[in-house]
Image (cartoon, rainbow, N blue to C red):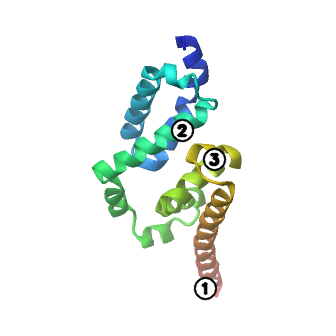
Amino acid sequence: MTKDIFQNTVFIHRDKMYRFAKSILRDEENAADLVQEVMLKLWQGKTELEKIKNKEAYAMRCIRNDALNMLKRTRLATDYKESLPQRNTIAQYPALTRELVLSWMQRLPDKQKMIMHLRDIEEYEIGEIMEVLGMKESAVRVNLMRAREKIKGQLSKVFDYEKGQLERSKR
């Protein structure tokens, strides 16, 4: 594999890889480092990479695996959960729906979080998500549905709270 072929088949996906790594790690520097490490691994294994049919899915799978391994080694997940804002902070900023949804996405189980990120943020098709995560279509769809239901439930609580606040303020 030549440098040009590598750039046109793998390197062009570095931004998606970075966003995916960042969504898992929740740290910009670690995500950037991880993408560099994965790119280096892919370049070093370029002869094996030539045999891979969908290089983008393979690269994204490498990101996922290495990011999860990094979380295990450094315990970023525990640190992140401790740094989450308290519930009253959420009540203070109900208009920031996008930020709320992204925050709640981070609290989802890993599979649901990855699937929802790939589908709703990166706009991957179900088939592409199946390939990236190595899951069956039914598992992808079920996890996506469950993730969306959890987020919808949280949004309903916030909207109900806001509706109640508005009604009280009119009295």
Examine the rendered structure and indicate whether residue 125 appears above or below residue 10: below
Residue 74, horizontal then vertical, whole percent: 29, 49
Gap between marks 2 and 3 measured at Cα: 10 Å
Question: Which circle marks residue 60 in the picture?
Answer: 2
Residue at screen point 54% across, 38% down: 60
Residue 68, horizontal then vertical, whole percent: 41, 48
Gap between marks 1 and 3 measured at Cα: 45 Å
Q: Tell me whether circle 1 and circle 2 mark residues in contact (CB < 8 Å).
A: no
Examine the rendered structure and indicate whether residue 100 appears above or below residue 14: below
Gap between marks 1 and 2 measured at Cα: 49 Å
Q: Is residue 97 left or right of residue 29?
A: right
Which tag, 2 or 3, sits closer to the chain's start? 2
Quadrant for the N terminus in the image: top right
Q: Is residue 20 left or right of residue 34?
A: right
Tell me the amino acid under the disc marked 1.
Arg
Tell me the amino acid under the disc marked 3.
Ile
Front residue of 132 and 150 = 132
Q: Which residue is mark 3?
A: 129
Residue 156, horizontal then vertical, whole percent: 63, 74
Front residue of 53 and 92 = 53
Residue at screen point 49% across, 20% down: 46
SS state under label 3: helix
Quadrant for the C terminus in the image: bottom right
Which quarter of the figure has residue 150?
bottom right
Q: Nearer the viewer, mark 1 or mark 3?
A: 3
Q: Which residue is mark 1?
A: 168
Residue 73 in view here: yes
Q: Residues within 10 Å of mark 1 (few under 14, many from 20)?
A: few
Q: Residues within 10 Å of mark 2 (few under 14, many from 20)?
A: many
SS state under label 1: helix
SS state under label 2: helix
